[in-house]
Amino acid sequence: MSSTRSHKLVLFFAISCLLLHEICTDASVCKESERKALLEFKHSLQATVFSGNDALFWISEECCLWRGVYCNSFTGYVEMLDFSYQPLVVAGTISPSLLKLHHLTSLNFSSNDFNGSLIPEFFGSLKKLKLLDLSNANFRGPIPSLLGNLSMLETLRLGGNGRVFNVGKLEWLSHLSRLKEVDLSFTNLSNANDWSQVISHLPLLQKLSLRHCDLPSISSSSLSIANSSTSLTYLDLSDNNLPSSAIYPWLFNVSSNLVSLNLSSNRLKGPIPEAFGNMMAIQELYLSDNLLILAENQVRGDSVLNEIEKLPDFMVLDLGYNLLNGSISKSIGQLSNLQVLRFAGNSFDGDVISEAHFSNFTYLQKLDLSYTSLTLKLNSRWTPPFQLTQIMLCSCKLGPHFPDWIRTQMGILTPDHYISYVEYLDISASGISDSLPYWFWGSFHGLKYINMSFNQISGTFPNNSIHISHLDPSSNNFSGPLTRFSLDYNMGTINLSKNKFTGSVSPICNFTGAVFLTLFDLSNNLFSGVVPDCFGSFPFLTALNLGDNSFSGSLPSSLRSLISLEMLSLRGNKFSGVLPSSLQNCAKLKFLALSDNELSGEIPMWIVQKLSSLVFLSLQGNQFRGRIPHQLCGLKYLQILDLSVNKISGTIPPCLNNFTSMAKKVSLDRRIEHHILDTGPRFLSPEGVRYIDEALLTWKGTKQSYPELGLLLAIDLSCNKLTGEIPEELSSLQELVVLNLSRNHFNGKILQKIGHIRQLEVLDLSRNKFSGNIPTSLSELTFLSNLNLSYNDLSGKIPASTQLQSFAPSSFSHNRGLCGPPISPNCSMVEPPPGKAAVGSEEDCDEFMKWFYTGMGLGFAVGFWGFCSVVFSKRSWRHSYYRYMDNAKDWVYVTFVLLKARLVRRIKGLSTR
Ligand SMILES: *[C@@H]1O[C@H](CO)[C@@H](O)[C@H](O)[C@H]1NC(C)=O
Ligand SMILES: *[C@@H]1O[C@H](CO)[C@@H](O)[C@H](O)[C@H]1NC(C)=O
Ligand SMILES: *[C@@H]1O[C@H](CO)[C@@H](O)[C@H](O)[C@H]1NC(C)=O
Ligand SMILES: *[C@@H]1O[C@H](CO)[C@@H](O)[C@H](O)[C@H]1NC(C)=O
Ligand SMILES: *[C@@H]1O[C@H](CO)[C@@H](O)[C@H](O)[C@H]1NC(C)=O
Ligand SMILES: *[C@@H]1O[C@H](CO)[C@@H](O)[C@H](O)[C@H]1NC(C)=O
Ligand SMILES: *[C@@H]1O[C@H](CO)[C@@H](O)[C@H](O)[C@H]1NC(C)=O
């Protein structure tokens, strides 16, 4: 019995040994003291991973076989701890028992989750360490300068923690003279004004990442650059906002062996220095998102490129998002080893790219010419010499015909595998006005990402399922039924909005990999029928937009499963019935648009109790009745409340002044932002994406979207059956911009203190029974641009102010007895009493919709990737983006944020499930 057990045990060890250690020797015998120290360490972490299956590996006697523990095969001492193999979620603090591992040379905690704990000071006493990797591990707080005692250290990675900072100077680093690799990216080094001094004197340093470190911008020309080390081969200083003067002087002294240089997202200004051409080893040059130009003698790009052309191994040229103009020289074609070419976001206005430019690019893999206004004149029978993996041509001129050469990039099928294929295709906003070629759906094999939005492409989707992670054919002329989608391991987004798709959406029940879908937008199509009750399989869905279709029936109860949902728009359909209580489960909702449907019943209390994060709530244009529940006042983040065009009765709850965001000048997010998990292919870096809601606002009969939601604080209760007076408390909503109470049965006087609502731009109190005088404080509202007090029982003199007198007489008409400008020259001429009183009947409300200012037909409009899915950074991105949008007269918002850590963790979490 016991012999079988020990047999099994041996077998088990042998197997774990095989699985876990590349080399497994019998010599490793765990030291008892080290075993104890490790157990103490394990205990201190209270890490969730140890309570799972992996506990198995930490219970045997032989600690050298424990997972993540590596001993010297002869001495048996623990030399290496590596927990990077899977996410460890740590609740405790790391025990100094590790100090008892006297032979520890390598510690790798990368990509675990230490839940914001501090980097332990005692790490500085692990004297033998050669490798310390704490990157992407959710540490926080100061870098212990005691790390400067680790004199054997060769590799130090603290990057990607976001909330780690360095106190004072980087002097401590200068003691680590054996360092070969340092990664401090995303740590705050804003006080380290000795950084360039320190790093240029680390004699063996080869690899340095200081991306996004808030590096201080001191002029480095004053620094001693004598004896600078020239060992650096890899240097990343991107995203530090540094001016040329803080980089160039020392850079060109340490750069002679550089192979890869990243200076993107700084403030490099002026002509591209020819000195880049002297970096004889350089293969990768990233200079995007700066303010670089081509000098006079570089107008054709020749001068810089001439230098670079002499560098035979040049592989990456990224000059995206600078101020380059003119035309792209054909001599670029001499870079025959080029793999990545990026000119995006420069204005080569009217320049034409032809086949000749590309003729030598046999190895090109990634091409980004987005936002260049370049015209690509390529013969439809052209066979490019390259096989691209990423094609980014958004807003280039490709049309009107669909670019046929793309077919050659779709992948080559060999008997056993696909050789190479495009994974990422962005041809959005490129002037294509054509039908989708017959070969399209049939030819792609590995395409993960397609953005062809904002064209006029017609066609239907295939009957069989489409395997993809990101698909954005929005704003085109696609038609036909919805197809089945199959999503893979990557988090995915599907945006079919603004097309002419028809029929039922029941294929959503047959999506495979629905668990990976984070955004699903079907808005503005011709879909109809009942929405199937199939949302049970979309746990990560963050935004769901079914707006502006012809869906009917009641809301599916499986909406309860959408626990990640932050945005839900069902506006502009024919949904009926009461609000299902299942919506309560969507506790993360910030944006809820149910307007223009046939929903009925009372406004449920749980909206307030369960959906407490709501920023935007629109129930406009339904059949809701009953009173406004006073609990609604508890929605403390609410910025827009639209209950207009319903059958709501009773009075306004005075507690509305509880809407803190409306009452106080708080710094609001100007937009409602949703963090959409996304692991789509990226051009240069794996960054996440934000999806930003926008409100649609009806203005003079046309719907315009209003992206800066946070600037529009609004209450619209118009067209209901509300009674009573306006509660005094409303006047404390100082930040309110729009107040529409028209077409109700309100009476009494207009708030005397209405002038306290300083930001008010739109005030509509028309078609009620307000009486008495117009309060003089109204004339204090300097921003007021729309005013309607007509159809009430108001009387007396209209208060004098340039503001009020500038409104049309119709703003005051049909009252009992208003007088003075603008309706009459003076008060001796009193307006005749109106013939018939106005009430908020339904017909009125229809008419009301056509009226001058119709309040807020708030809803949701598309806007995930919009067009151009490129990852490019803030500054120049915005410039180009807005430039385009000005022309498009439409707003779509996309921003990119760094979500890497969270992303990696969640994906890993998924994959281990
Ligand atoms: C730490 O582990 C991760 C994941 O295995 C690996 O990518 C990384 O290179 C390791 N760190 C070092 C410095 O070797
Ligand atoms: C992470 O830290 C927060 C507070 O800082 C705590 O509330 C939370 O429970 C911790 N998470 C884990 C998994 O220990
Ligand atoms: C760090 O080194 C200094 C001298 O180099 C020494 O005085 C100090 O005690 C060391 N600190 C630790 C924690 O080992
Ligand atoms: C970096 O740290 C400094 C002070 O150490 C602080 O003033 C600054 O706001 C921090 N920067 C960021 C981006 O957090
Ligand atoms: C392609 O390379 C050859 C040989 O290096 C060169 O002669 C030719 O000019 C290049 N073509 C272009 C378009 O640059
Ligand atoms: C789609 O799903 C429905 C119900 O889940 C099932 O009856 C139907 O057979 C499925 N269709 C396909 C093509 O898989
Ligand atoms: C108003 O806000 C206060 C404090 O935030 C809260 O205690 C109170 O319950 C709110 N009133 C209503 C009616 O929600």
Image (tube, grey):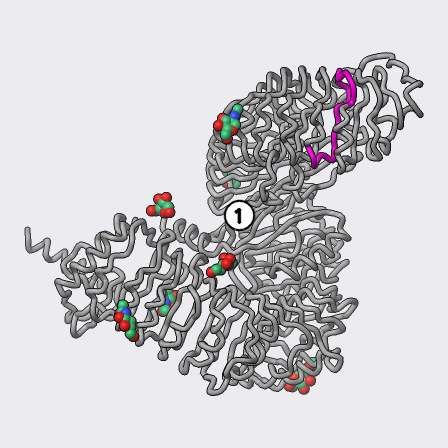
Q: Tally the numbered discs.
A: 1
Quadrant housing residue 821: top right
Image-based side of 709 in relation to 775, left or right: left
Q: Is residue 583 visible?
A: no
At a point 86% along the width and 34% down the height, the residue shown is: 806
Percent x, y of residue 763: 74, 29
* The residue stretch that appears in magenta: 757-774
* In the foreground, 619 or 796: 796
Secondary structure, mark 1, is strand
- Which residue is nearer to you in this view: 271 or 858? 271
State the residue in front, 624 or 726.
726
Q: Which quadrant holds residue 11?
A: bottom left
Residue, disc 1:
675
43 left or right, relative to 258: left
Residue 798 pos. (x, y %): 83, 24
Residue 142 image point, x, y percent: 39, 60
Which amino acid is tagged 1?
A: His
Q: Is residue 769 magenta?
A: yes
Which residue lies at the image location 63% right of the left edge and 74% below the top edge?
A: 385
Task: Bin the neighbour count of mark 1 within 10 Å (Cα to Cα): few under 14, some 14-19, many 20 and up.
Answer: some
**Is 298 rendered above or below residue 113?**
below
Is residue 161 among what the camera can see? yes
Q: What residue sits 55% from the left and 45% below the top? A: 674
Residue 896 on the magenta span: no
Question: In the displayed structure, would residue 861 be above or below residue 556?
Answer: below
How far across and how far down the image is residue 808, in percent?
87, 30
Identify the main secondary structure in magenta.
loop
| Residue 123 position (above or below residue 628) | below
